[in-house]
Image: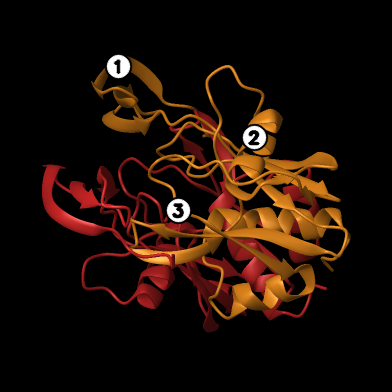
Chain colours: A red, B orange
Amino acid sequence: MPLEPWKILSSRHLFPKFRSDKCELPSGKPYTAFVMEFDSWANIFALTKNSEVVLVKQYRHGVQEILLELPGGVVNEGEDPLEGAKRELVEETGYSVGEIIEVGCLYPNPAIQQNTLYCYLATDVELTHSQHLDESEEIEVCLVPLDELPGMVQRGEFKHALHVAILFQVLAHLGRIK
Amino acid sequence: MPLEPWKILSSRHLFPKFRSDKCELPSGKPYTAFVMEFDSWANIFALTKNSEVVLVKQYRHGVQEILLELPGGVVNEGEDPLEGAKRELVEETGYSVGEIIEVGCLYPNPAIQQNTLYCYLATDVELTHSQHLDESEEIEVCLVPLDELPGMVQRGEFKHALHVAILFQVLAHLGRIK
């Protein structure tokens, strides 16, 4: 039997952006599925002229640790994801983009989230502004040589899975994956 | 000022496994943070003797698409993640593990989830069982040559970001990242 989507019989929101769908499975059985209707996310792999990656270090409350990550965040409603990525880069780090291209569109968690992760590679980025952070944000900017980042992932020093996926896309784009 | 964790002043569950924390930021300001207390996840990159990757194709209701992914799933309470990965592989695909090693531990979403994604590489896997699926699961098993998977990611044919991160860890472990 070929794979088929589930039929949605009825939907309701338990909270804003948190939906419960009463579904009928291809087998005919009923099933209740939950969907988190997050806005999409855009992250940016920003390289300086010296092949250093612009990273951000911040406290993450889910895991209660201070982590090294790529700049980025939520795409505002109606905002172009590429513009969102550039905006987040300059707000969080003060760096502005030279060239920028999309290196992929992934799903952060397709089973329970509907949103997309837009992945960008920016080159020749330059420090042009001071940081402009939200009230709850406290962010340190760190430059790391591109060649060192894969080893940092392997040693557990760069642990954000979605950002490791973006590193994959960037290295594939640069022809560095065999 | 060095980065500091947030102080949790009080916590309550809005739902089972969905927590609201009243926090004090390092600046002294109050902030309410939400944490999804998901159980950890384990996924397995399973290679046959012929260097084919064992993939699963299934409908994912968050994005309402049929997707190609790595086998894996939720680690049961009290279960060793490695045993969970082996169990999910055999249940979803019927393949059993020869050698297996951990190639990394990542955070799927450290801002709002506390859980860990355990990443395993299994080699010399062999078809030994028939599938044993949950009632809501309908899964097709696909074998894809390892050398083709990076191109599939680049072409948008393998879109699960967490599984792309595991592919990175595997290729790094195999010395295929420059």
Tell us which disc is closer to us: 3 or 2: 3
Tell us which disc is closer to us: 1 or 3: 3
- Residue B147 in sight here: yes
Q: Is residue B113 above or below residue B64?
A: above
Expressed as whole percent of the image width and height from the top left, the position of residue B127 reads: 75, 50
Residue at 44% over, 68% down: A2
* Of callouts 3 and 2, the N-terminal one: 2
Along the viewing direction, whichever of B90 and B39 lies nearer the viewer: B90
Residue assigned mark 1: B11
Amino acid bearing label 1 = Ser
- The quarter of the picture where residue B86 lies is top right
Chain on which label 3 sits: B
Q: Which mark is residue B138?
A: 3
Chain on which label 1 sits: B
Residue at 36% over, 31% down: B35
Q: CA distance from mark 3 to mark 2?
A: 17 Å
SS at badge 1: strand
- Numbered-mark total: 3
The local crowd at label 2, few if under 14, some if 14 to 19, many if 20 or more residues have their Cα within 10 Å, is: many
Residue at 25% over, 54% down: A37
Does the CB distance between marks 3 and 2 fall below 8 Å? Answer: no
SS at badge 3: loop
Marks 1 and 2 belong to one chain? yes
Q: Which mark is residue B87?
A: 2
Left or right placement of residue A170 versus residue B157 in this view: right
Amino acid bearing label 3 = Glu
Q: Is residue A115 above or below residue A79?
A: above
Residue at 45% over, 62% down: A107
SS at badge 2: helix
